[in-house]
Amino acid sequence: MPKKSYRQAINEALRQEMRRDPSVIVLGEDVAGGQGASGEAGLVGGVFGVTAGLFKEFGPQRVLDTPISESAIIGAASGAAVTGLRPVAEIMFVDFVGVCFDQIYNQAAKFRYMFGGKAKTPMVVRTMIGAGFRAGAQHSQTLHPLFTMVPGLKVVMPSNAYDAKGLLIEAIRDDDPVIFMESKTLYDTEAEVPDEAYRIPFGEANVLREGSDVTLVGFGAMAARALQVADALVKDGIHAEVVDPRTTSPLDEDTILESVEKTGRLVIVDESPPRCSMASDIAGLVADKGFRWLKAPVKAVTCPHTPVPFAPNLEDEFVPNPRRIEAAVRAVLEFD
């Protein structure tokens, strides 16, 4: 099976779905790329190069470069979705969602409910999340809790290239609005990815590593980081089980609870501030439904409750890192 980067896997999913279904369109700021610059239009494909080549194959009717207006992008995508198209809209950085949040949470998320199930909104919003690029507080946030709490939205956070392709194909074929969150630090990471199209169902977590001593739950890039820590701890005889939920809405509660029942200890790694985070949500879930299995208090490794710093040394410390994750694991193992 060929190895492909996270970026290539997403591009391939878009390309294959656009070939399969002429109702799939892509729109957003600079998704074609190259206009007004040297070189051929369509070669760049956005600020991270994810949509490169799509414009050349599918043309301006299906790959639409938009004005710099997130409200216009999501408004157009929402209208297109309810009238028969399957738009994939790109919000360049998730931080910009404040400009268009009304169209997402107050309109697209509610269409099916308000019209008694007769309206479908097959819309995907691709957006980039996470710190680590020295991009400052307004381009580095991880805002999945904002979307997860909205009824009517599905929220996807792939942690590797294989999942990115399968989950995006599932998102494009879904009849509800899906927020597809891509971790910027993962774009160049590679995994084995089939050439053919495949789907990964929402609400089915992936156990990245089996273990018996402690459960590590991580989202997106933090699942990959939790796996890195788990692999390193083996040398000390610590066997951590790593659970990647893949989607925060729907959330696979059963897999998380089954893992905690087996290990009796839980550490949650979440690249968002601690208040109202997925870390607090899952801690509450386990306290409610799995308290009898716990051998130690639940630990959460999150970002501090502060904007993302620009200074490199502070930004590196801001994001949950292997040192902090390992410390949390060792802390819960102190309890018998």
Image (cartoon, rainbow, N blue to C red):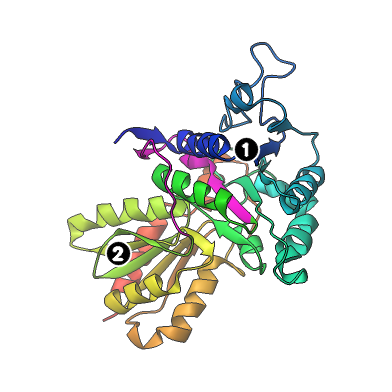
80 horizontally vs 263: left or right: right
Magenta region: which residues?
178-201
Give the position of the C terminus as an image quadrant: bottom left
Q: Is residue 280 left or right of residue 98?
A: left
| Residue 143: image location, x then y, percent | 63, 56
Which of the numbered marks, if any, corresponds to residue 241?
A: 2
Q: Position of residue 23 (x, y in %)?
A: 65, 41
Position of residue 266 relative to residue 31, above or below, is below
Q: Secondary structure at mark 1?
A: loop
- Which amino acid is tagged 1? Pro
Q: Which residue is mark 1?
A: 22
Q: Position of residue 125 (x, y in %)?
A: 65, 48
Q: Please determine whether, in this image, residue 111 is positioned above or below residue 83.
A: below
Residue shown at the point (74%, 54%) measured from the top left: 82
Magenta span has 16?
no
Q: Residues within 10 Å of mark 1 (few under 14, many from 20)?
A: few
The N terminus sits in image quarter: top left
| Eye-nearest disc, 2 or 1 | 1
Say few, some or many: other residues with alpha carbon within 10 Å of mark 2 (under 14 / 14 to 19 / 20 or more).
Answer: many
Q: Residue at horizontal 44%, vertical 84%? A: 289
Q: Would you identify the image quadrant in which residue 57 lies?
A: top right
Q: Residue 197 lies in magenta, yes or no?
A: yes
In the rendered image, is residue 272 in sight? no
The residue lying at 40 percent from left, 74 percent from top is 254
Say left or right for 77 vs 203: right
Nearer-N-terminus badge (2/1): 1
- Percent x, y of residue 17: 54, 40
Disc 2 secondary structure class: strand
